[in-house]
Amino acid sequence: MDFTFSEDQLLFQQSVRDFLVAEVTPERVRSLWETETGRDDGLWQQLTELGLVGMTVPESHGGLGLNALDFVLLAQECGYVALPEPLVHTVLVAVPMLQEIGGELAGQWLPQIATGQARVVVGLEQNLLVEDAHVADLLLLQRGGELYALGRDQVTLRHNASVDPSRRLFAVEIDGKPAPLVGAAQAAPLLAAALDRGALGCAAQALGLAQRMLDLSVQYTGDRHQFGRPVGSFQAVKHHLADVAVRLEYARAPVHRAAYSIATGAGNGALAVSHAKLVACEAAGLAAKNSIQVHGAMGYTWEVDLHIFMKKAWALANSWGDAAFHKARLAREIFADDALLGAGATFGAGARQ
């Protein structure tokens, strides 16, 4: 398996980072916190014009026809700027689910997503609250194992506050008794795939968030002086930041491995995703903790940008399956009677791809 991304993929990642860093500034994020919807239609249109919203929409419906492996680097950049817009959710969860459902529903909504004319969200019972339900034109909701496709006028929303003000979360109640789009038996694989993609999106964003908090801490400890020299020159501070850098580097490969599994169907995708989400969110959590340590009391203040990324890291850690859920999935695999463990299973003839 080759984890090396192509030169084109890396150049695209850099161009997307340059755009996002220039457009999605901490000041812009803060200003969106004060708006009614917390969303920026102008920014969404910019993302659409760059082709990002329609990345996984098939070419036959006006998109680029790419997959999770193509998008995972860009999802990291969304985390790096704490992007409020639901780009990762749209590309990794909503669009693939519509593709798998197919038929008239996909034919109606995929072209509108690719052109930025419609927003679609997915709500699973794994997540008690649905993000961005207030701006969604179509909601794909799980209820009792069944899957419903509903317009915003068919549901009642109740807003719930989040630790991350960029996340607009809603309890969604279905009005009346509409017929389900897909029954429980057919919905099960759709819901399982959506959960894995949502968790992969969280993991990729967590990498970006951890990198941003590390970058902010390196900059702050280089600028801040005590006893006539930068605080970043003190050994204890170096150790805090080095621990984050090591944990972050070790988290990258599992996230890319999970994206490969989701995109190609190779190996145990659920296992790879749970591993990726755990290590990436642990890296982001450590980055938040140690960044607060090296910033000192300034790290808690509103005017320092650190809290923007720290809050999103905390929120994503419990989205699309919390640590307990993903640890349980790993444990079931590791302790199974037929588990493929050890060097022979990793590198030998019986190794999973």
Image (cartoon, rainbow, N blue to C red):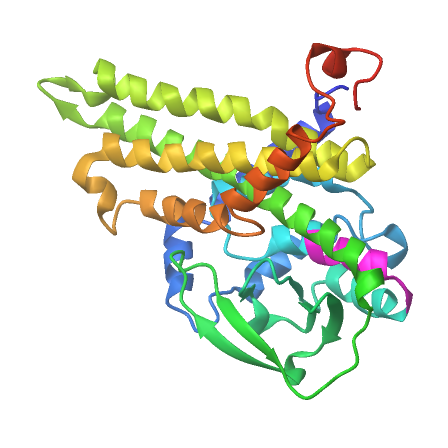
The image position of residue 274, as x and y in percent, is: 61, 38
Determine whether, in the image, residue 14 is placed left or right of residue 104. left
The image position of residue 189, as x and y in percent, is: 79, 53
| Residue 61 included in the magenta stretch of the image | no
- Span colored in magenta: 93-103
Q: Is residue 96 visible?
A: yes
Determine whether, in the image, residue 171 is placed left or right of residue 4. left
Q: Nearer the viewer, residue 46 or 138?
A: 138
The image position of residue 42, as x and y in percent, is: 56, 63
Q: Nearer the viewer, residue 270 or 311?
A: 270
Residue at 73 percent across and 41 percent down: it is: 68
Residue at 26 percent across and 23 percent down: it is: 222
Determine whether, in the image, residue 258 is placed left or right of residue 287. right
Q: Is residue 145 above or below residue 230?
A: below
Determine whether, in the image, residue 308 is placed left or right of residue 137. left
Residue 97, quarter of picture:
bottom right
Q: Nearer the viewer, residue 2 or 148?
A: 148
Residue at 53 percent across and 22 percent down: it is: 250
Quarter of the image with the N terminus is top right
Q: Is residue 65 above or below residue 191?
A: above
Residue located farthest toward the left when viewing the structure as drawn: 227
| Residue 94 included in the magenta stretch of the image | yes
Residue at 70 percent across and 22 percent down: it is: 3
Residue 156, quarter of picture:
bottom right
Q: Is residue 233 above or below residue 135?
A: above
Q: Is residue 258 above or below residue 309?
A: above
**Magenta span: chief secondary structure:** helix
